[in-house]
Amino acid sequence: MQNRKLEAGKHELREARKESRGLYWFVAIFSFFANMLMLTGPLYMLQVYDRVLGSRSIETLIGLSVLVLFLYGTMGVLDYARSRIMARVGAKFQARLDRRVFDAVIRKSAIAPDEKTQTGLRDLESVQRLMTSPALMALFDIPWTPLFLLGIFIFHPWLGYLAISGGLVLIVVTILNQLYTRVPVGRANMANVASEAISEQIRSESEMVQAMGMRDAAFDRWQTARSRSLTGQIAASDLAGTFATITKTFRMLLQSAMLGLGALLVLRAELTPGAMIAGSILMGRALAPIELAIGQWAMVQRAMKGWRNLSELLGEVPPEQPKTALPTPRALLDVQQATVVPPGEAQASLRMVSFTLQPGQALGVIGPSGAGKSTLARALTGVWRCAGGKIRLDGAALDQYEPSVLGQHIGYLPQRVQLFDGTIAENIAKLSANPDAAAVVDAAKKAAAHEMILKLPGGYDTRVTSNGGRLSGGQIQRIGLARAMYGNPQILILDEPNSNLDNDGSTALNQAIRAMKSEGKSALIMAHRPAAIQECDMLLMLEGGARVAFGPKDEVLREVVKNHQQIQQAGDKGGVR
């Protein structure tokens, strides 16, 4: 099964690469002529040493030099053209897969994040970088290496044997480089990812780290991960540098050996001085792609690792098939024997839960911590899929809606509200590049956040960061509530909505729920506090992931809560926190 997924991912990557097949042919054709023109240097030296110096003809030297200038200019144009083409091939490959990989990362991260999801977009970038690098261009040059070696053989067999022997040594070094550096480079990359993850986590929680005096401890933890990353990078760099140095030194030695052997053959009258110089130049050109590949091997390995990660990621998260557009649903939610197993766990945290929420009703979901309330919220929004049973919105299963469309019908306020870098208006409008100003203000008014936002320095255009900046927890939660209500969703799902709200905020929340009900829409409130369920008509009590009671609020409270009167009085006052 895993192998089939991997092959599916590889097939998808190959199909994206094949879209530029015509451009690859252009690069191959340009490479052919560019490599033919590489013979310009050896032939020029051959003519200079064997004809110009012998005839002492300045006119011949000038004519050859002009011709060489033209040929080298042509070669430069071809080399520039093929590098530009490969840059566009890489850009096209990345643009073709950007949305696909981004969606796969989001979908996988919402379920079970791992190394492949953390590095998914960087993996795509590493493959694209290889496509535009000299290392990949060397693959188009290597097929012409035998031609250069043949030219050396034409000058003298001994020179050919020396060049082939040197080439074999470099190939062996390349194979050893791949074998010995693969594991250290992989470890260094993993350590670097872990270090960046810790750094990002500390940065996002910088206020808490500073306030609780955790800065030194946080630095020590980050430095430990950073040290592992640096140690791994140094080890991998040292090993790769060793092979690169061996390659460079051996190639220089080989070039001198070619000159030495050529000189011996000249002294024995078996070779001309021009052929000696030309043979040395040809050998350098023949082995240059191999040396280049070894020098760029770290990039090649990173791209190979990225290709494998992308293959696994895309294989595990297949592309979503287009779904038939459905009409705007009624606020009718039907949960049938829903069982949900959290990602990465073997035990269900929600087991065979059933209930129906009618349009115009508000349902409170209560229960102790760990009862499954947040799990139910994630399942109702389609983030976590049911391992058993069904959740239907106006008769249609949630997976019959496109995720973006489902998000328009179901508004969601999670326990921990996260803002994004941008303006408050952009955050309320769910990061839309062109927010509907009227809809943004309308959502803010429904969440009783309009007046609060107007008092900020820039109003709706106030820029905030991912950690909220100077906004309080209550302000962030009100903006999150406005975001959940943006676009007039049919159902509103609120997970502990008043955890950071003051009394005015709780009153505004209850007003919003009443407004939803009056419009024939529905709301679900996962709550610990009585004030949050004041507007609820129905109650669902969970315990241990199972339904304990469901029905009208007063009946459920009488059935399962001993201090019913106390909670009811506190709810009426709206002030018990």
Image: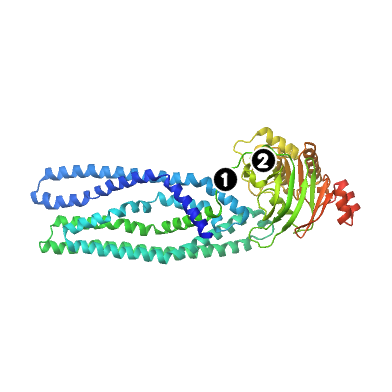
Q: Residue at x 51, y 46 (%)?
A: 98
531 with respect to 106 (left or right): right
Query: Crowding at label 2, few (<14), some or many (≥20) Cα neighbours within 10 Å?
Result: some
N-term mark: 2 or 1: 1
| Residue at x 34% of width, y 53% of height | 139
Alpha-carbon neighbours of circle 1 within 10 Å: few (<14), some, or many (≥20)? Answer: few
Task: In the rendered structure, find residue 408 and report the number of the disc placed on it.
Answer: 2
Looking at the image, can residue 566 be seen?
A: yes
Residue 328's spot in the image, x, y percent?
68, 37
Q: Disc number at residue 271?
A: none
Asked where in the image residue 266 lies, by quadrant, the reply is: bottom left
Residue 317: give x, y in percent of width and height: 56, 52
Residue 474 seen in the figure: no
| Picture coordinates of residue 4, whole percent (x, y) | 51, 57
Viewer-closest of 516 and 235: 516
Foreground disc of the pair 2, 1: 1
For the point 52% across and 65% down, which residue is it? 228
In the rendered image, the quadrant that contains the N terminus is bottom right
Q: Are marks 2 and 1 in contact (CB under 8 Å)?
A: no
Q: Please give left or right for residue 94 compared with residue 222 in the image.
A: left
* Tag 1: amino acid: Gln
Local secondary structure at mark 1 = loop
Picture coordinates of residue 307 (x, y %)? Answer: 47, 55
Front position in the image: 266 or 567? 567
Residue annotated with mark 1? 321
